[in-house]
Amino acid sequence: MNRGQIGVILSFVIAFGLVTATATTSGQDKPRKTFLSPLKEGQTVVVKEVAGRYEITLIKDVRLAHTVKEVGADYVVFEDALGVTETRVPIYSIKAIIKGKVPKEE
């Protein structure tokens, strides 16, 4: 191969790499939803231990027993209603996140 052919091939590889990198990153403007996505810092929830696993119940606009203090990639920190204890729960110990609704009055 001569230098001209190598230059053309190298240019093609670089251009293809730039187009591929741009195409894969342009559609990722929205954050990806994860298992812990429904939980937000400051939100009140009920934390219930069932057979060594935790069920977390949240009901919009209702004051509940615990407050979400921190949501990490693989854990959640809760504070009790009195602000006395914090509990750090790893994601593998969470059985379910339950979203409840208060019935509308007619």
Image: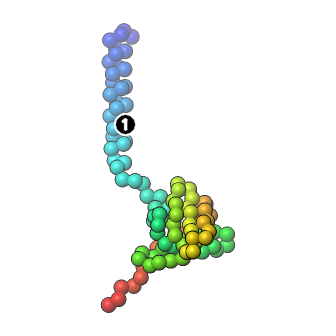
For residue 67, above or below residue 35 = below
Residue 35 in the image: state x and y as whole percent. Answer: 50, 61
Residue drawn 67% across and 72% down? 51
Is residue 22 visible to the viewer in this orientation of the structure?
yes
For residue 69, above or below residue 11 = below
Q: Position of 28 compared to 100: left or right?
A: left
Residue drawn 47% across and 63% down? 41
Numbered circles on residues, count: 1
Residue 46 in the image: state x and y as whole percent. Answer: 54, 75
Residue 32 in the image: state x and y as whole percent. Answer: 42, 54
Q: Residues within 10 Å of mark 1 (few under 14, many from 20)?
A: few
For residue 9, above or below residue 28 = above
Most extreme residue toward the bottom is 106
Colour basis: rainbow
Name the residue tied to disc 1: 21
Residue drawn 41% across and 77% down? 61
Q: Classify residue 62 by image quadrant.
A: bottom left
Nearer to me, 9 or 28: 28
Q: Secondary structure at mark 1?
A: helix
Nearer to me, 58 or 41: 41
Identify the image quadrant of the N terminus: top left
Residue 47 in the image: state x and y as whole percent. Answer: 57, 73
Q: Position of 37 compared to 93: left or right?
A: left
Nearer to me, 74 or 44: 44
Name the residue type under label 1: Ala
Is residue 100 visible to the viewer in this orientation of the structure?
no
Q: Position of 20 compared to 56: left or right?
A: left
Q: Classify residue 50 by image quadrant.
A: bottom right
